[in-house]
């Protein structure tokens, strides 16, 4: 009988597009004082031809930066999250069937209560513009069928109970490279300590608050 991991590898035998996409996410809130700065996060989405893929997020809170990277490695059958500021990692077995990043014909059916409003090009990458508007948010996303409907650009305007916009999350692509990603994105330094997800998140919270690690 084929193992679950063997079945997973079978799903990713066909070569998939490789990419490395860097975006900037800006978050604003109507509850902030007018002079308060918006919160900015830098993200990198990346994928290899074997189906392995991930996302790296760099954020600054209380003047303290931290980069965390989550990736699924088909070759080792592992799902790994590492947080550089605390030198910790969390490793779990890769869940069979977790990979659905194959090339899609269309992305218009991926969001509930959304409609396709056009096709565009972003830095040479074909995307579909998909819009939705419900009680929670008004949103516009630009999804790339070639990359398994990855959201390359998005804008969410979150609504309060009265239907008025109270905050926003806007993600803009800075650089799109349809080539092999930096291999270091899939690496973990040997001195990173293996911990549970809760322990890693608590350590990051203490780091952002400027408290010493336990």
Image (tube, grey):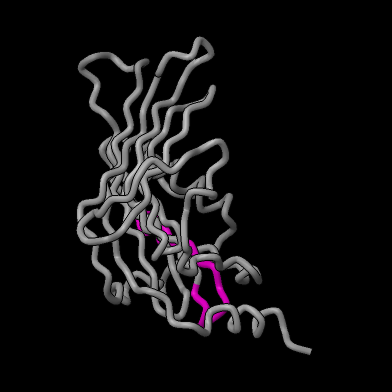
The residue lying furthest to the right in this view is: 1
Q: For the point 30% across and 65% down, which residue is it? A: 20
In the image, taking residue 154 as reference, residue 36 lies left or right, namely: left
Q: For the point 51% across and 45% down, which residue is it? A: 202
Q: For the point 59% across and 78% down, which residue is it? A: 11
Q: Position of residue 57 (x, y in %)?
A: 36, 52
In the image, taking residue 5 as reference, residue 178 lies left or right, namely: left
- Return the residue nearer the eye: 50 or 43: 50
- Return the residue nearer the eye: 135 or 35: 135
Q: Position of residue 118 (x, y in %)?
A: 35, 45
The magenta stretch is 73-88
201 w.r.t. 176: above or below: above
Q: For the point 35% across and 36% down, which residue is it? A: 155
Task: Determine which quarter of the picture holds residue 209.
Answer: top left
204 w.r.t. 106: above or below: above
Q: Quadrant of the N terminus?
A: bottom right
Task: Determine which quarter of the picture holds residue 207.
Answer: top left
In the image, taking residue 10 as reference, residue 63 lies left or right, namely: left
Was residue 76 drawn as part of the magenta stretch in this picture?
yes
61 w.r.t. 194: above or below: above
> How many circles with numbers are drawn on the protein?
0
The residue lying furthest to the top in this view is: 162
């Amino acid at each position: 009988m084929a193992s679950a991991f063997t079945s997973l590898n079978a799903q990713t035998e066909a070569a998939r597009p490789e990419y490395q996409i860097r975006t900037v996410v800006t978050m604003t809130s109507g509850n902030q004082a007018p002079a308060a700065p918006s919160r900015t996060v830098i993200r990198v989405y990346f994928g290899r031809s074997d189906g392995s893929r991930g996302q790296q997020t760099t954020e600054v809170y209380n003047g303290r930066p931290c980069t965390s990277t989550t990736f699924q490695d088909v070759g080792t059958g592992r799902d790994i999250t590492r947080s550089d500021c605390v030198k910790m990692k969390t490793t779990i077995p890769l869940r069979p069937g977790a990979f659905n990043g194959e090339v899609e014909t269309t992305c218009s059916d991926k969001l509930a209560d959304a409609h396709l409003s056009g096709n565009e090009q972003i830095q040479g990458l074909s995307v579909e513009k998909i819009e939705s508007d419900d009680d929670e948010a008004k949103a516009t996303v630009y999804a790339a069928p070639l990359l398994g409907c990855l959201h390359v650009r998005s804008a969410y305007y979150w609504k309060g109970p009265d239907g008025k916009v109270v905050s926003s999350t806007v993600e803009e692509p800075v650089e799109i490279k349809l080539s092999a990603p930096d291999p270091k994105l899939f690496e973990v330094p040997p001195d990173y300590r293996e911990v549970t997800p809760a322990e890693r998140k608590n350590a990051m919270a203490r780091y952002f608050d400027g408290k010493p690690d336990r």
